[in-house]
Image: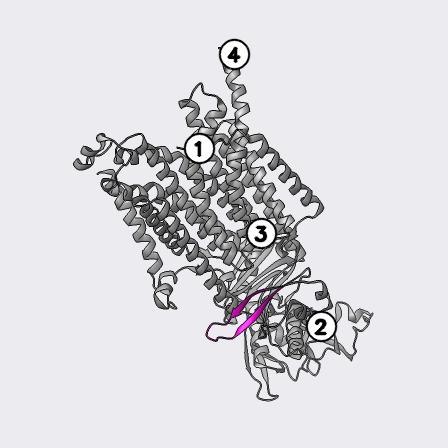
Amino acid sequence: MKNINFVGPRYIFLAISLTMITISIVFFFVRGFNLGVDFSGGTTMSVSFNSMKLTPADVRAIFSGADPIFKNASISQLHSLTTTGTQTKRSLFSITIGKFYNVDQKDKLVKNVQEIAKEHGVNARFESFQTVSGYAAAGLRQSAMWASIVAGIALLIYMAFRFQFIFGVGAVSALIHDLTITAGLYSIFWIRFDSTVVASLLTLLGYSLNDTVVVYSRIRENLKKMRGKPMAEIVNVSINQTLSRTINTSFTTFIVVFVLFLFSGTVLRPFAFGMSFGVITGTYSSIYIASPILIGWLEKRRKKVALRR
Amino acid sequence: MRTDKVRLIFILLVLFVSVTFMLYPPAPSAKGFWGHLFGNIRLGLDIKGGSRLDYLMVGKQPTPELTSQVITVLRRRLDDANFTEAIVSAVGKDGIRVEIPGIDNPKRAEKLIGQKAQLYFAQVLDQVRSSVKPAPKIGLSYAGAEWLQSKKSTDVWYLVNKYIQVGAGRLQLSGNYVSNARASVDTQRGGWKIDLTFNSKGANIFFQITQALVGKPLAIVMDNYVLSAPVVQTAIQGGSAEITGNFTYDQAQELAALIRSGNLPISLKLSEEQTLGPTLGADVIRRSLIVGLIGVLLVIIYMLIYYMGAMGVVAVIALFYNAFFVFGMLALTHGILTLPGIAGIILTVGTTVDGNVIIFERVKEEMRTGKTMRASISAGFNKSLAVILDANITTLITAFVLYYFGTGSIKGFAVTLTIGILGTIFTSLVVSRYILDLMAPFIKNKYATILEQPESIKGGRSR
């Protein structure tokens, strides 16, 4: 069996990771997040037209005619839509605006848009509509925050229960590493950050921990088997022994979430992005962060035990 | 009984239960093979289309009694208007959620829900035409009176008082005394009207009021609009009244429904609306199926190539077994499959494969030490047990937290993930184990030496 030296260049990878974490944190504060309407309040709608030639600029013109605030709306074109039964193709656009619409206001907007669209020679149909008031958004933000805190604490307790303290520290470092960098990418690439993304980040937490746990279990086992060997060697052997499992699992999971990212519609794309990248960073961190972090500490403890004897 | 027999019984039992609940009771609207297979799985509004409306109770401190009263009233209103599939539920301590499948414009439903429907009868003290609200009148006889707009023509204002002067005293008559309301054709004036029936107490009050107001107008007020203000011709006995106003059929039906269902004890304010039309919904279902199939297919190909032979086959069987388990349990628990829920199922593909990979790698390691195939399998499973549990419990913790804190569609993710993880643990530790044991005699341990042969021929067991 091949034996790759993972722990040797650990300081290089640590440096790379620290740089990425720093960049992420800078982006959090400087740029912030592209919050979805469920976190910021506002409205996202998808509207289809019976003309394939329409551009976002045309759509903006139609909507601005109905309500001038759409001059600043974010508008993007989605995949085209085929109505079942017929073969007519419709172009589909996603429109997001920071305003809440109650049912009467929505009704007026729909009527106005349809009228102006008719003047432009096209027929507009509202395919989906999501509107969230500021109050509801604050509630959703709050429950997302609590979910993250409670999940973090619960996972910590589990780790403390199953492993020694230092393993907990290592696992948490890896988790913070994964979360920060993944969240940073949402800020850097300005990908919509909504409740599904929080679900994705929490799942990634579980996934990354899962990966770390597998390697840690092996380290724990080898600490007994390879008594007296240098810590770095024990950790490196453990990583190598679990390597084919790590790669197979990560690769298959990556396949499914990446296919989801490529082919799913706009709703699940931000979720799938987090999962796809999360699998990569989760795998990387369990090999290059979580495990090497243990070496120094375990070595120190072994010396202490030796001195006492 | 031998352990592998017990395993087999469990495997078949779980599979039987899953498939049974997927197929039985047969879904009424199911079409074709796929329709029947998945017909019993309830789809969320974010997949099949429909409207979700979230309201906040405002104006008063909501109590549990008040909330359940609101739900009852809304339930009645929606049933009345034929939204029988609608679901009304409480969210948190001040939220009410209404979910109506299959509609792409919630306007009609919203009109029913958003109205408090506070109905009362009032004495008309004055009537003017004005584009703005007239100034209040001062004087002892105007105490408690207020200007209200006409529902029909917005420039007509009535000065009304709900405390109706009857002799020396004052009487009140509200919608609470109405026992029935229904729409009927107005043969005299054309259009539609609403017939009201009072309960016995209401009938008595109505008689006294109409007796006092003969020759004067009596206003019928709903949610602070005057619906009509007919002049009382004679004192009315028998406890029935009618609201005329040349209504259309729909308007009359809606008003009758609102009066029948009673008034809301608290005001509702819309805080969230989410509507998905049927076209986009169908598109979502098609895409999710394609995504799921491509993902699963790629994983199957990868597993078959990487684990040439028996182990690859076991992994694929495990994958299908867990898929049946997840869908069966969804049908059994009446869980609702949402869009993020589909993501949860897709993720389950990953965890199932993970469970098998952990075991296979361990078994391979044991094979390298020269153990027999059966002994390797046994040792491999025993040593992977803790890791598989650890790995899945961490994900399970996340899923529980998401279920508790998540709203709507995220809950759907938590549900499928939880079922998927439980299925993964079962498939990895029981199903894969059984099949691998079954195949053991046919797998050649390429690392093994002479030691191996006799045991597999005798079919002896390693424990």
Element carrying mark 2: helix
Decide which of tag 3 and tag 1 comes sooner along the chain.
Answer: 3
Of B65 and A271, which appears nearest the observer? A271
Q: Residues within 10 Å of mark 1 (few under 14, many from 20)?
A: many
Magenta stretch, main secondary structure class? strand
Q: Is residue B195 visible?
A: no
Name the quarter where the N terminus of chain B is drawn: top left
Q: Chain of mark 1?
A: A
Q: Chain of mark 4?
A: A
View extreme (top): residue:
A309
Q: Which residue is mark 1?
A: A240
Q: Which residue is mark 4?
A: A307
Residue B213 horizontal side relative to residue B424, left or right:
right
Distance Cα–Cα, label 2 vs label 3:
32 Å
Q: Which residue is mark 3?
A: A195
Image spot of residue B28 (x, y percent): 37, 68
The label nearer to you, 1 versus 2, is: 1
Q: Is residue A200 magenta?
A: no
Element carrying mark 3: helix
